[in-house]
Image: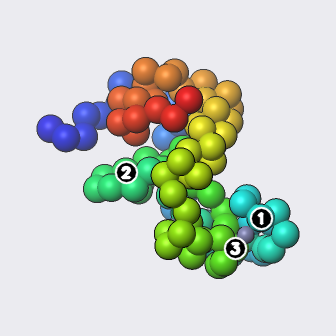
Amino acid sequence: MIFPKPKHRKQRSQHKSNPMLDGSELCEICHIATAVETHELRSGKGYRLICQELSFQLKLCKTCHDNWHLRMTKVEKKPYRAMKQKEIIERTAVSKAEWIERLGESWL
Ligand SMILES: [Zn+2]
Ligand SMILES: [Zn+2]
């Protein structure tokens, strides 16, 4: 099975389907423009839902979202992934082992 069920499902109750941004938050890359789109930070088959459950996402303006996909390199993206991962681990008490089990990779 590619997708083992996590043993601890405590965070499950926090699940929300990808919420529409209400225009009250700033883009997490430029911090100038209003965030209008979310980007899942772990791409690939099966990871989208987990990203949504853990909020392993960036809220971005259209320009930064385009940049992310078209121009930014893996090295440039890593600090954003690391920052989010750290934030989520601190907030949800997901262990690093559990993180790797669910996301397949750690950026810390
Ligand atoms: Zn932006
Ligand atoms: Zn995206």
Q: CA distance from mark 2 to mark 1?
A: 25 Å
Q: Nearer the viewer, mark 1 or mark 3?
A: 1
Callout 3, which amino acid? Cys
Task: Indicate the colouring scheme.
Answer: rainbow
Q: Secondary structure at mark 2?
A: helix
Q: CA distance from mark 2 to mark 3?
A: 22 Å
Q: Residue at x 66, y 78 (%)?
A: 63
**Quadrant that contains the C terminus:** top right
Q: Residue at x 65, y 71 (%)?
A: 64
> Which mark is on residue 30?
1
Sequence order check, earlier mark of 1 and 3? 1
The crowding category of the residue bearing disc 2, from other C-alpha atoms within 10 Å (few below 14, some 14 to 19, many at least 20), is some
User: Could you tell me if the residues under marks 1 and 3 are in contact, i.e. CB atoms within 8 Å?
Assistant: yes
The residue carrying mark 3 has its beta carbon less than 8 Å from ligand 1: yes
Sequence order check, earlier mark of 2 and 1? 1
Q: CA distance from mark 1 to mark 3?
A: 8 Å
> Closer to the camera, 74 or 107?
74
Q: Based on the displayed image, in which of its 4 quarters is residue 72 positioned? A: bottom right
Q: Position of residue 45 (x, y in %)?
A: 28, 56
Residue named by callout 2: 47
> Closer to the camera, 12 or 20?
20
Q: Residue at x 29, y 34 (%)?
A: 5
**Quadrant that contains the N terminus:** top left
The residue carrying mark 1 has its beta carbon less than 8 Å from ligand 1: yes
